[in-house]
Amino acid sequence: MSGEISSEQAVRGAIQTHSKRVWRFGLALSGARDVADDLLQSTCLRALERHHQVTSHDRLDSWLMTICRSIWLNEVRARSVRKAQALSVTPETELIATGPDSETNIFAAEVFTQVMHLPEAQRETVMLVFVEGYSYREAAALLEVPIGTIMSRLSTARQKLKTVMQHEAADAVRRGGK
Amino acid sequence: MTFSDETLLAYLNGNLDGTDAQEIESAVEADPELEQRLMALDPFAPVVHSVFKDVPQDAPQITLPDRARSQPASQPFRLLAVAASVAIVAVSATLWATRPAPLGWAQQAAIYQSLYVPETIATLDTAPEALEAQFAQAEATLGRPLNREALSALPGAELKRAQVLSFKGKPLVQVVFADDQGRPFAFCVIRQGPGAPDKDVNLAVLSGLATATWAEDGYGYMIIGADGQSDLSDRLTAFSEAIAS
């Protein structure tokens, strides 16, 4: 046997390692945790079926993300959209880990809500860049848009997030001034 | 074309006009190094990251079919499988390690301060009575004096406001100043409790702002400069003397 690991092993390993990221991305795409569950499951099965296509074991995370997004766009989105719209009105803030400080928790819930309320294109971009740490060009490749589009989506998203962050600052001032 | 951290931060905060923003965006397309700088300065990314990093809290359930039967399950193969998963874990551990850690008070204060612009402090009420009331409240919350007189007399710094904030339940006071050019910079004090270790001065650029942090006798201190290039050494001496006097 050669010293190389089989592509199936690599894909299985990547699935274990990146399951949270793929789930999170599924949540960002769909806005609903049950859809995220389904997206992750389908993504993993699809990835295993296609392990022969894997030529490099380097960036299996972005490969999984791409599969997840294509399943969302081609197979799930149409039937989930109504549901997702309904859910995006009340994003699932209970998903956030709560700490001992209630003000921090409220702030986290506000940021979470604001991100989940972004239009889908901005939301998936914010998720990939801010949360998963992909560079602008990596996100551009993954989402198949020009890098300028990534940057302008982020700019728009920042303007919306700024409101929450400034509210937080204002709240802090009010609390201090009471 | 090079851009200062200040310009990049203005872009990230949405404070550049369309043409200037366009210029940065087209420069980034050709310049991965600029892209990295811009990403590192982004004050929004660490906040959003910290909110989402533990979502979902537990590893999600996945049902995978058993391994294909054609593959040998011999001992060497298992070892290779273990080696593979270790390699993948190592790669992903590296990726995670390079991600922002949970935010400490200094990072959070820097993020907050990075939203300040000259306009934020231009119209603050700096009448002696107003400052006196703010300092009385800040000193009471912190449980230590802040020497307003000394802070009012610092060179190249106009005292603008002291406000009480809180980080994870610990009282945090931000004293904001205008520098010679009217740009905001801050001096922060947090009460960490009598058991907190002393720390030597640490210089870092956080959220695009030059900062100096240190800790002494249960309090943490931080100077947050007006931009990423500010030399804080003079301020450091001035503030530690002011606070000690």
Image (cartoon, coloured by chain):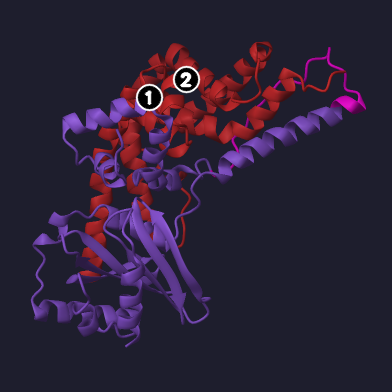
Chain colours: A red, B purple
User: Which residue is nearer to you in this view: B108 or A41?
Assistant: B108
Tell me which secondary structure the magenta stretch mostly adopts. loop
How far is mark 1 from mark 2, CA to CA? 27 Å
Amino acid type, callout 1:
Ala
Marked residue chain, label 1: B
Mark 2 lies on a secondary structure that is: helix
Q: Which residue is mark 1?
A: B30
Residues marked 1 and 2, same chain: no
Residue furthest to the front in view is B1
* Closer-to-camera residue (B100/B21): B21
User: Which quarter of the image is occupied by the C terminus of chain B?
Assistant: bottom left
Q: Position of residue B85 (x, y in %)?
A: 73, 33
What type is the residue that disc 2 sits on? Answer: Arg
Residue at left 86%, top 25%? B77
How far across and how far down the image is residue B162, in percent?
22, 72
Q: Which residue is drawn at the image coordinates 25% and 67% (left, top)? A: A175
Residues drawn in magenta: B57-77
Chain of residue at mark 2? A
Residue placed most toward the observer, B212 or A155 = B212
What residue is at 25 percent from the left and 33 percent from the top?
A156
Q: On the image, numbered disc 2 is attached to which residue? A: A69
